[in-house]
Amino acid sequence: MNIEILLFDGFDEFDAMAPWEVFAGLAQVTDRVRASFVTLDGAGPVRGDHGAVVMAHGALSERPDLLWVPGGGWLDRSPTGAWGLVQAGEVPRAIAAAHAAGTVVASVCTGALILAAAGVLAGHRATTNPHALDDLRAFAGVTVLEARVVDDGDVVTGGAPACALDVALHLVGRFVGPDIAAAAARELQYVVPAVDAFVG
């Protein structure tokens, strides 16, 4: 399974690094998952919202099995980050193309606004950071729910940044197996929230 985590200047570091910790850590228990950081422009350094610099491994492929989109920079309307990406349009178009090719797309926090701008949330249920729920409701065709994780088939979204672990572990359970997801959670000493925090 090829998992690509999309980076962009102004991404929220936790939104991207928490799933990386989960997905990359699976290499200890299975060879069925390969995770990488990608950008539209290829390998190189990318600066996060809080100043951390992460090296992308390469460019977004045409059809990864799973594309993870972090948030960051939406709530303060930053010219970098999610808000700036939506205004520019290039990243939403790339996400739309990958989704149309059959990629499952996932996001956490305000990454959902990038997915909405890409049009991939139309006709789907979704969630986002609680402070951005009204912004998400402004996109036509999106049924907005208040939950930690919303799995609606080919799109999976999560709430505020800490939900990144919930979404990542949920995806491991769905695509790799619940036993491996449970083992990954134990390795992190992470207690998965009650089932009523999940929709799907």
Image (tube, rainbow, N blue to C red):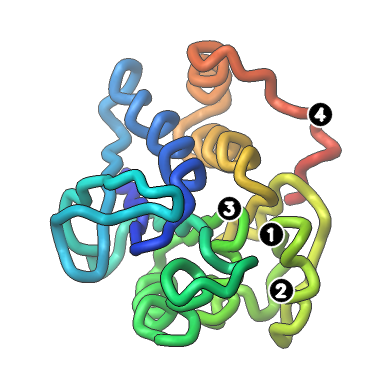
Of the residues shown, which amino acid type is indicated by label 1? Thr
Alpha carbons under labels 3 and 4: distance apart: 18 Å
- Earlier residue among tags 3 and 4: 3
Eye-nearest disc, 4 or 1: 1
- Earlier residue among tags 4 and 2: 2
Alpha carbons under labels 3 and 1: distance apart: 7 Å
Q: Which mark is residue 145?
A: none
Q: Which mark is residue 194?
A: 4
Alpha carbons under labels 2 and 3: distance apart: 13 Å
Alpha carbons under labels 4 and 2: distance apart: 25 Å
User: In what quadrant of the picture does the N terminus appear?
Assistant: top left
Of the residues shown, which amino acid type is indicated by label 3? Val
- Earlier residue among tags 2 and 1: 1
Q: In the drawing, does residue 27 fall left or right of residue 85?
A: left
Eye-nearest disc, 3 or 4: 3
Task: Provide the residue designation for mark 3.
Answer: 108
Does the residue at mark 2 contact the one at mark 1 (Cβ under 8 Å)? Answer: yes
Of the residues shown, which amino acid type is indicated by label 4? Ala
> In the rendered view, would you say 94 is above or below 133?
below
- Earlier residue among tags 2 and 3: 3
Name the one closer to the observer, 125 or 85.
85
Task: Provide the residue designation for mark 2.
Answer: 136
